[in-house]
Image: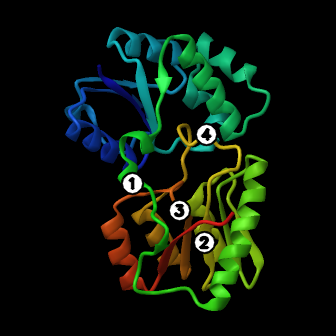
């Protein structure tokens, strides 16, 4: 049975695709028009490049290719829902959008899941297929947080969880137990850059939202996160262990060591 991938921006779709292929699955790819970063057509057994708003056509394509399980992977910028000329929604997508009580990530993804389940298609998590991508607990780099930075990590973790309850974002930037920036519609990398315009040597904390279904929108960090931190002169990246995907781990650790950045996987009860 083939595995479906609905691919957004970034390197994650290609990484997941390669891992799934290694495990012997056929892969059917829905590549979101004007969002996907890389050409995935040559890696798939069936492929469609389509506007994100054509949900009815996406469903037909998945059913035609006998897809019963799919992975949602890659970034879909939150601002897309406000770019009506870009979305070009069909009747099915309009109905879904209006059925959402709120426009936060969690609510919109739940609407998508409901529609897919109604067509006999189940969403599976990246961690089900590629558990090796999850951030392990512990210090991953040569650099280690100081005692004061550990206090900032703990503080940032509690703030990020509270922000997550409101379905706003997954990342906060802190220093000296003060919140410098909170992720919203712009995404993690731009939040880091924004914080760097005001404060250096900050602590970046990324967590899952308390109500979050990790199959639908897992927190993700990777080499772009480290490059944004270098630009913003941030010092610590703290990721929630076993719930955050850490892509290109070896490259991340290498670059973090080069830049003097500490990367840690943390777990607080």
Q: Which of pointers 1 and 3 lies earlier in the amino acid sequence?
A: 1
Q: Earlier in the sequence, mark 3 or mark 2?
A: 2
- Cα distance between the residues tagged 1 and 3: 11 Å
Between disc 2 and disc 4, the foreground one is: 4
Q: Is residue 149 above or below residue 249?
A: below
Inter-mark Cα distance, 2 to 1: 20 Å
| Disc 4, SS | loop
What residue is pinned by disc 1?
133
Task: Determine the residue positioned at 36% across, 84% down.
Answer: 258
Outermost residue, front side: 269
**Residue at label 2?**
204
Q: Which residue is mark 4?
A: 213
Mark 3 to mark 4 CA distance (whole Å): 16 Å
x and y, in percent, of residue 46 in the image: 26, 22
Image position of 143 with respect to 1: above or below: below
* Contact (Cβ within 8 Å) of mark 3 with mark 2: no
Instruction: Assess whether mark 4 and mark 1 are in contact (beta carbons under 8 angstroms).
Output: no
Mark 3 highlights which residue? 241
Instruction: State how many labels appear.
Output: 4
Residue 83 at x, y = what percent? 63, 35
2 and 4 marks in contact (CB < 8 Å): no
Q: Can residue 241 be seen? A: yes
- Which part of the image, by quadrant, shows the C terminus? bottom right
Mark 1 vs 4, N-terminal side: 1
Q: Residues within 10 Å of mark 3 (few under 14, many from 20)?
A: many
Q: Is residue 256 left or right of residue 243?
A: left
């Amino acid at each position: 049975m083939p595995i479906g991938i609905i691919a957004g921006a970034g390197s994650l779709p290609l990484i997941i695709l390669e891992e799934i292929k290694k495990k012997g699955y056929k892969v059917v790819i829905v590549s979101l028009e004007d969002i996907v970063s890389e050409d995935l057509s040559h890696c798939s057994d069936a492929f469609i490049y389509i506007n994100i708003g054509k949900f009815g056509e996406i469903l037909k394509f998945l059913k035609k290719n006998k897809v019963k399980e799919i992975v949602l992977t890659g970034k879909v910028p939150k601002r897309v829902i406000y770019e009506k000329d870009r979305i070009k929604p069909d009747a099915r997508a309009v109905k879904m959008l209006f059925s959402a009580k709120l426009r936060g990530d969690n609510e919109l993804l739940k609407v998508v899941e409901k529609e897919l389940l109604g067509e006999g298609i189940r969403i599976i998590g990246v961690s089900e297929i590629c558990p090796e991508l999850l951030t392990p607990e512990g210090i991953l780099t040569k650099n280690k947080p100081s005692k004061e930075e550990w206090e900032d990590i703990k503080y940032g973790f509690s703030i990020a969880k509270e922000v997550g309850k409101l379905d706003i974002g997954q990342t906060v930037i802190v220093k000296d137990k003060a919140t410098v920036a909170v992720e919203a519609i712009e995404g993690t990398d731009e939040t880091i850059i924004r914080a760097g315009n005001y404060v250096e040597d900050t602590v970046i904390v990324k967590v899952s939202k308390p109500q979050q279904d990790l199959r639908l929108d897992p927190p993700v960090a990777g080499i772009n996160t480290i490059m944004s931190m270098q630009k913003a002169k941030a010092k610590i990246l703290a990721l929630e262990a076993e719930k955050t995907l850490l892509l290109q781990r070896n490259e991340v650790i290498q670059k973090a060591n080069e830049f003097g950045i500490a990367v840690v996987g943390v777990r607080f009860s």
